Image (cartoon, helix red, strand yellow):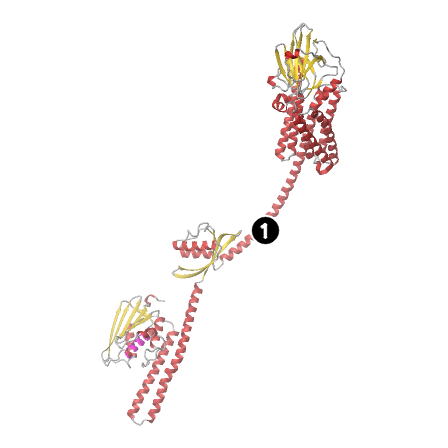
Amino acid sequence: MRSVLFIIGFFFLLSEHTVAQQPVKLQGQEEINLNFHFYYFIDETGSLTKEEVELREFEPVPSTGLRTNASEQAIWLKLKVLNTHHENQSYYLQFVDPTIYKLLLHDEDQVFRSGIGFHPTERFINSHKHSFFLKQAPEVEKEYLIKATAAIKITLDAKLIKHDVYTERISKERFFLGLFYGGMIILFIYSVLLLITTGQRMFAYYAGYIFFVALLTGAGDGITGEFLHAWVRWKEGYQDAASAVASNVLGVMFMIMFLDVKKWSSVFYKLNVGFMFLVGISGIILLQLEHDIIFDLLGLYGIIQVLLMVSTSIQAKRKNVPQAGYFLVAYILFGFFIVWFILSLFRILPYGFISQYAIHLGYGISVIVLSYGVGVRINSYYKKLLKKEQEEQELIKRKNEELEQQVAIRTEFLAEKEGNLRSIIDNNTNAIWLVNNKYELIDYNNIFAKGWEAAYDQKLELGKSIIDQMPVQNLKVQWKVRYDTTMEGKPGTYYDQYIIGNKTRHYEIKTFPIFQDDEVRGVSLFSADITERIEWQNKLENQNLMLKKVNQELDSFVYSASHDLKAPLASVLGLINISRLEQNPKEKEKYYTMMETSIKRLDQFIKDIIDYSRNARTENVREKVDLKSVMANVFEDLRYIYEKEKVDVQLNIDQKAELYSDPMRLKVIVRNILSNALKYGCIKPKKNIIEIDASISKKKVNISIKDYGPGIDKVHHDQLFDMFYRASESTSGTGLGLYIVKETVTKLGGRVSVSSEPKKGTTFSLFLPNEINNES
């Protein structure tokens, strides 16, 4: 802007005028050009006082005008004004050059201030103009002394403007400038909002461009000095140069991004970037050096920039770059107003309002067009975004519909699978349940629910801790350990017993960790009722033991039977042969007696085998038993060895309840024990005693049979009930009697024991259950 004003002054200086050596006559003119009415003196040091200057010789302003470098100087101007009217005349002395830093008007003893170097409140007239108010008395000539200083070149351009004309003109200018800067503020805010909304960096450049354009035009019309005095003081006269550098650089940066120059032409991109760096770097250097050549250089840069932007816009338009036309129109209009301004300087066009504010109009209209283009760009951008969003929404809608169909199909499939799985789980013979890592029950099948209710007499609740639902404390501890172990990732197998319905049930429980994302999230458990399997295993083990025992007994039986059957038969055959040879009847009778004994022994052996076989092959019979009658029948069977005069049998029965048992097996037991007692415990010629004590209650019957014979050594007690075992080889027994006793007692669910010492007799104790309460 300042360079433009320099050009204005330059052309004014070229104009031909007559140097006015006479006072300016106030004759009611609206405006008087004072450029050639001044006398001047240049203070080279800028340090002289008014009094010192008044002593110096002033020279008239040359016909070529006055333009000087005042960086270190002060220009003193002397102006004489004569009021030729018969009444007071009011005029404003206005200096057009906005670069004047300080103006001091000396009027007699008073000093009035103006210029951008003073704060607006310090100025004679608080305005954007460099003005002084002059009131001239009738027919009076006054002399004014004015001191002007600046950091750069000063172009002398001053006017006297009549009061009412000045007031009207200032009002119009204020109105126009208000519209201009109001519009610039709106466009600046608009750009900032676009930056915030879109996040695109080019709007930051555009906002900066508008801001510095406003500062640049404000330097030319005085608005910057009036409202941004701190900026003026900081730059000390170079504020418009700094604004011009910043606006040029930001304008090029905005154009490069807006037209996306790099994308379609590397040549134009490099030209614009190179020009941008040239302006920026040279401007910064010259601003630091505070060299006034910067203003001439910026004028040249301005012309180059307009040409570069117009040519770049034309090329972008050819490349069909969106909104390139707006950029082209904006800078064509800007160039138009620049040309208008230059032509007005040469007075080819009249210098009026448009000429005075051509720079403002050029920048303002170009910025408005650019902003409209930006709006179109944003509108187009958001339309594309909206269309893209609509397409994406439509795609999402289609995808959602497809997904919903897939979900529906998948849901139906999963529902079917879940139904099948639920059917498998609920119809499984195993109890199945699942808990999470908080021990909360999350699912179970019907078998588990029924088993739980049968075991604990309570119903399960989903979502609650299964440990808390256990009514037994020791089970809580036991199961918590099992759950914790499984949650460490270790499967387990456990065997438990529970009493359900007065019966012990056996269960095999398997635990498995539930993994999700390589983490244990719970435990699944499977419980199988293995009661029947355990019973069959026990039965099989018993049968195996029995079979092993039978095999062992069979081996013994075969061996002993072959001996015990052959010995009596061989004895009988031998005695028969001897008796045939014997002629003596008494000797024959002796042999007959011996044969009878062998036959009885063989008969007893056969009876023992029959008793053993009957006990092993037949089931127990439950009948009411008269123990006393059983004893009588036994003694009747043993009459061949039972001699009443030789043996005293003492029978004592304490019967508190009726006795129910297997009478045949009970008789076999008692007969074998009594047979041994009679044979081996009653060896005295007389006064042999056998004590039989019996106690019958509702639960059991205890029978004790005691003799006072020679007794049995303890070394034989453990084997006494084995098959074919004999405590002494001299005995005539078969070795099956006590074995049959033990097997029969075991069959009845009882037990038998022996207590004996040598020479103290022998006692057999029987403990048998009373089946009175086990009626079927």
Pick the quarter of the image with the C terminus.
bottom left
Q: Is residue 735 above or below residue 574?
A: above
326 on left or right of 772: right
Residue 627 horizontal/vertical position (percent) = 29, 72
Q: From this view, report whether residue 736 is shown above or below residue 401.
A: below
Asked if residue 333 shows in the view, the reply is no
Q: Position of residue 561 (x, y in %)?
A: 38, 81
Q: Residue at x 31, y 87 (%)?
A: 594
Secondary structure under the numbered disc 1 in the rendered image: helix
**Viewer-closest of 155 and 635:** 155
Number of on-image labels:
1
Give the residue displayed 32% in from the left and 74% down from the top: 715
> Magenta span has 49?
no
Query: Which residues make up the magenta segment?
Result: 667-679
Q: Is residue 677 magenta?
A: yes
| Residue closest to the eye, 313 or 625 | 313
